[in-house]
């Protein structure tokens, strides 16, 4: 997702952009009423004063620009619109105002970004709700396949996730690399969000293209609370495509509690990875070795 640039091109345009960015309504009105500043003047990136004011959250300046005839749906070179920037920054009052004057949710950035994706990525629940009420497509995707639900799950924004799921988002929709919202939430350690996704039908065993599962990622990071949530739904504990198991990952991470949780759930401590190693071969942690020690006699026999 792109960020705003404030580069200006001419002295009067510079003044108009400065006024829009700072929220100086009196100066902005003076410049616009002079007839010497085009309301849709652009900087070198294609940004307009309306985009700047929308990004900065200056409602009165946005309203003045719109009333002076600013093109609401004009796009910057990146594809972003005023609505995109207002949504990205969480300015719900401005989002509503732009909709009143005909803002469209259909414009995309060069990476496929939309106002809904931006608002979801930054956790702006009220903005997401407003966008959905005004026709935003809940199935919007970045060009890499990331959905609004994926981006919200990545950020740990549980209220946005709940709203999107209630509004019809597909809980198992993967990114192009196979990463699902549950996988990314598990990797990031968002245990409460993992619980919500599982209760809404997320596939606990959905593997990414490299074969790693949500349980494997949680184990590799030592996120015990995530592991506990996943184990409630009995995920597979067996060998992954890369030859390792969640138990291998937990041992390498060195998290004793993670190892104990997986062993209690029935993880097989004798499974070898592609390097012909079993979990005890990977640990330098005495507490973990004591957990695995009952299998040492089996290993030597």
Image (cartoon, rainbow, N blue to C red):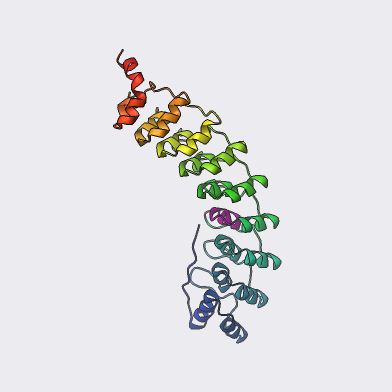
Residue, far top: 301
Residue 239 seen in the figure: no
Residue 265: x and y in percent read 48, 26
**Residue at figure coordinates x 52%, y 29% from the top left:** 235
Residue 226: x and y in percent read 49, 38
**Residue at figure coordinates x 59%, y 86% from the top left:** 30
Residue 285: x and y in percent read 30, 32
**Residue at figure coordinates x 38%, y 36% from the top left:** 255
Q: Is residue 193 left or right of residue 168?
A: left
Residue 203: x and y in percent read 57, 34
Residue 290 versus residue 193 in the image, above or below: above
Q: Is residue 120 magenta?
A: yes
Residue 93 seen in the figure: yes
Q: Quadrant of residue 219?
A: top left
Q: Is residue 197 magenta?
A: no
Residue 87 versus residue 210 in the image, above or below: below
Residue 116 versus residue 253 in the image, above or below: below
- 230 or 271: which is nearer to us? 230
Q: Is residue 223 left or right of residue 129?
A: left
User: Which region of the structure is painted magenta?
Assistant: 111-124
Q: Quadrant of the C terminus?
A: top left
Q: Quadrant of residue 197?
A: top right
Residue, far bottom: 34
Q: Is residue 146 left or right of residue 219?
A: right
């Amino acid at each position: 997702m792109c960020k705003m640039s404030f580069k200006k091109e001419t002295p009067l345009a510079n003044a108009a952009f400065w006024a829009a960015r700072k929220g100086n309504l009196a100066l902005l009105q003076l410049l616009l009423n002079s007839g010497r500043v085009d309301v849709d003047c652009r900087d070198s990136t294609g940004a307009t004063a309306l985009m700047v004011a929308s990004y900065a959250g200056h409602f009165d300046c946005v309203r003045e620009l719109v009333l002076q005839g600013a093109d609401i749906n004009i796009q910057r070179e990146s594809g972003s619109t005023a609505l995109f920037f207002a949504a990205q920054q969480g300015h719900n009052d401005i989002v509503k105002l732009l909709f009143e004057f005909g803002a469209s949710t259909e414009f995309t950035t060069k990476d496929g970004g939309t106002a809904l994706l931006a608002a979801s990525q930054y956790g702006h629940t009220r903005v997401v709700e407003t966008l959905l009420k005004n026709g935003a497509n809940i199935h919007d995707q970045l060009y890499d396949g990331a959905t609004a639900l994926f981006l919200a799950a990545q950020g740990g924004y549980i209220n946005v996730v709940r709203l999107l799921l209630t509004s019809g988002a597909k809980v198992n929709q993967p990114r192009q690399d196979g990463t699902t919202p549950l996988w990314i939430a598990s990797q990031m350690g968002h245990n409460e969000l993992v619980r919500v996704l599982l209760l809404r039908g997320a596939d606990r065993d959905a593997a990414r293209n490299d074969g790693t599962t949500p349980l494997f990622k949680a184990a590799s990071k030592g996120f015990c609370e995530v592991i506990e949530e996943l184990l409630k739904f009995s995920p597979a504990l067996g060998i992954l495509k890369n030859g390792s198991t969640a138990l291998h990952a937990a041992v390498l991470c060195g998290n004793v509690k993670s190892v104990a949780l997986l062993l209690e759930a029935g993880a097989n401590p004798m499974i070898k990875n592609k390097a012909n190693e079993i979990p005890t071969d990977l640990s330098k942690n005495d507490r973990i070795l004591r957990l695995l020690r009952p299998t040492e006699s089996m290993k030597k026999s």
